[in-house]
Amino acid sequence: MKRNRSSELSRMNERFQLPMPSILLAEDDEAVAGLLRRFLVDAKYKVESVRHGRAAIFRLRRARFDILITDLSLPDIDGLDVIGFARDMQPNIRILAISGFLVEAFVRVATRCGANGTLQKPFRREAFLRSVGVLLQAESRAVSARAC
């Protein structure tokens, strides 16, 4: 039987009293943000969500996060710019870029700018949590934001 990596991580955190991984979620669509936040909280992640790119940058300057999940289409600052700022401020952060408009060119650019993974909306809860779990288990590759 295939085990869910995210569930395994949650059980290990509870068993060994490890700190919950912290996630910054930058998503401007309130319904999508609420749903993703619920998925993450139910999986025992510590989540902070913001609706704008500038707010994400503000939070990245003031707190350390294990993962940044950002929509590529934010109302004030492009998600690619948020990825670049995140790489400058927290080089070891793991980044998941999400969008309803992920075409191959965007995936390449998001990856070049520093995203460790991409996910196209709409996606299922399991696929989303699997992507987050994979990021947590992987080494973050520090990428120069200047590559954007």
Image (cartoon, rainbow, N blue to C red):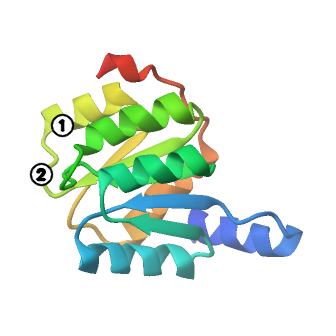
Q: Which residue is mark 1?
A: 106
Give the image location of residue 107, x and y in percent. 23, 37
Furthest residue toward right:
16
Residue 142 visible to the viewer: yes
Spatial CA distance of label 1 from label 2 is: 8 Å
Q: Amino acid at mark 2?
A: Phe
Q: Does residue 86 lie above or below 30 as drawn?
A: above
Q: Quadrant of the C terminus?
A: top left
The numbered dot on residue 101 is: 2
Q: Residue at x 26, y 76 (%)?
A: 30
| Label 1 with label 2: CB-CB less than 8 Å | yes
Q: Residue at x 42, y 34 (%)?
A: 85
Q: Residue at x 54, y 59 (%)?
A: 23
Label 1 vs 2, first from the N-terminus: 2
3 horizontally vs 31: left or right = right
Residue situated in front as seen by the camera: 100 or 104: 100
Q: Quadrant of residue 109?
A: top left
Give the image location of residue 58, x and y in percent. 46, 50
Disc 1 is placed on an element classified as helix
Q: Amino acid at mark 1?
A: Phe
119 horizontally vs 44: left or right = left
Disc 2 is placed on an element classified as loop
Give the image location of residue 115, x and y in percent. 39, 37
Q: Does residue 143 lie above or below 51 as drawn?
A: above
Give the image location of residue 44, x and y in percent. 63, 75
Q: Residue at x 56, y 41 (%)?
A: 93
